[in-house]
Image: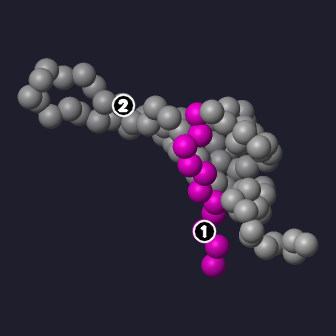
Amino acid sequence: MQVSGEIQEPFDLIRLSLSERVMVKLRGDRQLSGVLHAYDGHMNMILSDVEETVMIVDPVPEGVKPSIRVAKRQIEMLYVRGDGVILVSPPQRE
């Protein structure tokens, strides 16, 4: 029997993060930070108040150090497909 608030499986940690801000790392050097509203067993998620951060590596000639740019944008509501999710980090608890 599971007590409310107890963590026994990885999905329990996600369940306890509902309505809280989580960090989601995605394929393609993308990262999201937003409030988690819903998720399923495939890690499809609905996030609100999202900040998306994308790392962009500009192509350069061989032997030259590549330049990396960071692009950020705000998104009001976002559906995230679980097949692109690499990592979900819950909020830090004190």
Q: Which of the two discs, 2 and 1, labels the residue nearer the N terminus?
A: 2
Q: Is residue 12 magenta?
A: no
Nearest the eye: 22 or 15: 15
* Identity, as a three-letter code, of the amino acid under mark 1: Gln
Q: Give the range drawn in magenta.
A: 84-94
User: Where is 12 relative to 80, above or below?
Assistant: below
- Relative placement, left or right, of 32 versus 68 is right
Q: Residue 56 carries which label?
A: 2
Task: Let me know if residue 55 appears in the view.
Answer: yes
Q: x, y (%) of residue 48?
A: 72, 43
Task: Point out residue 79 in the picture as x, y percentages from the top left corner.
Answer: 72, 33
Q: How crowded is mark 2: few (under 14 residues within 10 Å), some or many (20 or more)?
A: some
Q: Where's residue 45, x and y in %?
A: 73, 40
- The residue lying at 78 percent from left, 58 percent from top is 15
Q: The C terminus lies in which quarter of the figure?
A: bottom right
Horizontal side of residue 89 vs 13, given as left or right: left
68 sits to left or right of 75: left
> Which of the image's four quarters has the N terminus?
bottom right
